[in-house]
Image (tube, rainbow, N blue to C red):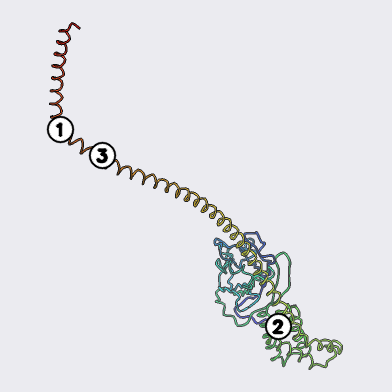
Amino acid sequence: MPFMHVGWDSAVGAIKFVWKIENFLKLDSHKLYSDVFSVGDYKWRILMFPKGNKNEDHLSIYLGVADSGILPLGWSRNAKFSLTVSNQIDKRSSVKGATQHNFNADKDDWGFTKFIPLEELHDLGKGYLVEDTCIIKADVTIFSDGTQGSSKETSNQIATTGCKIATKSSTEEDIGAFFLDLESEISSSNNLSSKHVLEEALTVIRNTLNMDPAHSNDPGRNSKIKTAFDVLSSFDDCSVLTAEQKEELLTTKEKFVDLPERAAKAAKDKNLFTHKEYVKRTLGCKLERCLTEFKKAKEETEQQERNIATLWERVNFLYAEVGDAEKKKANFSSKQKEMFELSKDLKAELDVLEKQWPEYEATMKTAEEEEKMVGTEWLKMKNLFNL
């Protein structure tokens, strides 16, 4: 039985609800509902979108009325609530959102669409997922119509459930508030019976034992445990607690300090291992990518070396051809100059001949006439001798 302290003002009731979701990274559902929890006659549940609701880079969580479909027309519930994603390594880094809403048939759920970036949530080193488990807490206070949530004291209880597997657990904040209420009760218990005070002290111990040992390691909480044990040791009424029971309980006093410290260290070491495992896996993946890129770069380097060798072969071949062409060019250039000089000489001779040509033509004409005259005379001589 959780400890209940009733002191109603404008608040109708309140509850602290813890939802443990195992195998979180393996979830393939678009949305997920917690088990139903109640504050009096009011039924609630948490609605979560593991991959975001209309926003794929943030976790989305809401508080919803579980039985809205069967409530009478015109119903409404005024609630002040907070939703928290617990950081299981450093609780001071837990992400919390608080608001107030008047739930009705048109708006039967309310919460936060952009609660925490999924990249941050999925980073195992951040502490929001330990052993692939996410812890979401809801702190809900229900008010009567027209109130603004300024109650002085409300009913408090711890409700814990799990996704698929129910798991009992409590948090440091829950137990701290619990012990604070209990200390107030004990300090003002002048009018209470010895048996009632003893039962309150036993409740402190029972609730601490119901906690995860790693979560109970807190100096303030240890002080509450010591107070509870002091109450137990001050009673000698055998009708309330037998001597054997009293002795057995008192022998466990030291273990309330030793065991939580050992459990906290073990949890810290496990979280460190989980983080280092994630780092190792990440580094391994990066190394594999580096090796793949290295092999590709090596293959490309070798291919480029082959291309360069081929190009140099072509270059050397072209160099040889260029050399031959240069030699041919030099030969033709020399011959060109030789022909140029010869042409100039021939042109000069031709120019001289051209100037002398009329004289040669006149000589040619005279020679032809002389040749005719000689032929004529030669024929006459031939005829004279009748040859």
Categorize mark 3 by other alpha carbons within 10 Å: few (<14), some (14-19), many (20+): few
Q: Can residue 100 be seen from the camera position used here?
A: yes
Q: Which residue is the site of mark 3?
A: 343
Cα distance in 3D space between marks 3 and 1 = 20 Å
Residue extending farthest right: 244
Label 1: state its secondary structure: helix
Q: Which residue is the site of mark 2?
A: 217
Q: Residue at x 51, y 53 (%)?
A: 308
Amino acid residing under circle 3: Ser
Q: Is residue 102 left or right of residue 333?
A: right
Task: Locate the N terminus and report the quarter of the image it occupies.
Answer: bottom right
Q: Quadrant of residue 12?
A: bottom right
Cα distance in 3D space between marks 1 and 2 = 136 Å
Q: Which residue is the site of mark 1?
A: 356
Label 2: state its secondary structure: loop
The percent position of residue 177, horizontal first and vertical second, equals 66, 82
Amino acid residing under circle 1: Gln
Q: Which one is earlier in the sequence, the residue at label 2 or at label 3?
A: 2
